[in-house]
Image (cartoon, rainbow, N blue to C red):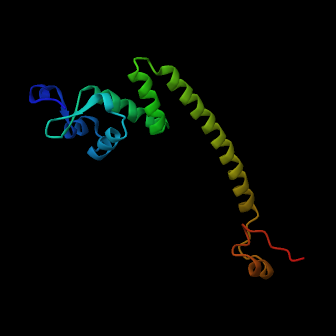
Amino acid sequence: MIGNSALNHWLKIGEVASLTGMSVKTIRYYEEIGLLTPATTRSESGYRLFSSQVLNRLAFIKRSQSLGLSLSEIQELLAVHDSGQLPCDAVKEHLLLKVEAITEQIESLEILKSELLGLLSGWQEQPSCDRIAQTICPNIEGVKRED
């Protein structure tokens, strides 16, 4: 906790929200899960107060999320930073993993797209009565065969 004499150097949560364009709720959540730890404190009356360093942290968090990093990944990267090291190597590793995951997702989506186009190319507006009786949508379901 800090005394009244140091209050001039700290930002209130509403000011931080206004400066960053983030909601007070989001900032409060980030503080609660420890993403803003070195940049935050409490006043004697219990109000959250933030150093100007919080603006850099929130900008990093926002940009990292836009690149697909999770809050837990961001927390790891901030821990590297907070230990006095530049986290760029760790950021690069996370981004390379994201690229791999995206490549796999694209491949899966291409397979799904081919399957969908195949289904659509053989689409029957009026399937046969025996197919209708055995399925909910004969166009996407195979007919069950009874032995």
Residue at the image point whose x is 58% and y is 28% from the top: 96
Residue at the image point whose x is 78% and y is 77% from the top: 131
Quadrant into which the N terminus falls = top left
**Location of residue 93 by image quarter:** top right
Above or below, 95 against 109 in this view is above
> Which residue, as the protein is rendered here, is positioned at the far left?
5
Residue 2 image offset from top left, x and y in percent: 16, 29
Left or right of 73? Residue 11 is left
**Location of residue 134 by image quarter:** bottom right
Residue at the image point whose x is 37% and y is 40% from the top: 33
Quadrant into which the C terminus falls = bottom right
Residue at the image point whose x is 86% and y is 77% from the top: 146
Left or right of 143? Residue 1 is left
Q: How many discs appear?
A: 0
Residue 142 image offset from top left, x and y in percent: 78, 69
Which of 7 and 123 lies nearest the eye of the viewer?
7
Residue 21 image offset from top left, x and y in percent: 28, 39
Left or right of 7? Residue 90 is right
Above or below, 140 against 111 in this view is below
Residue 61 image offset from top left, x and y in percent: 39, 33
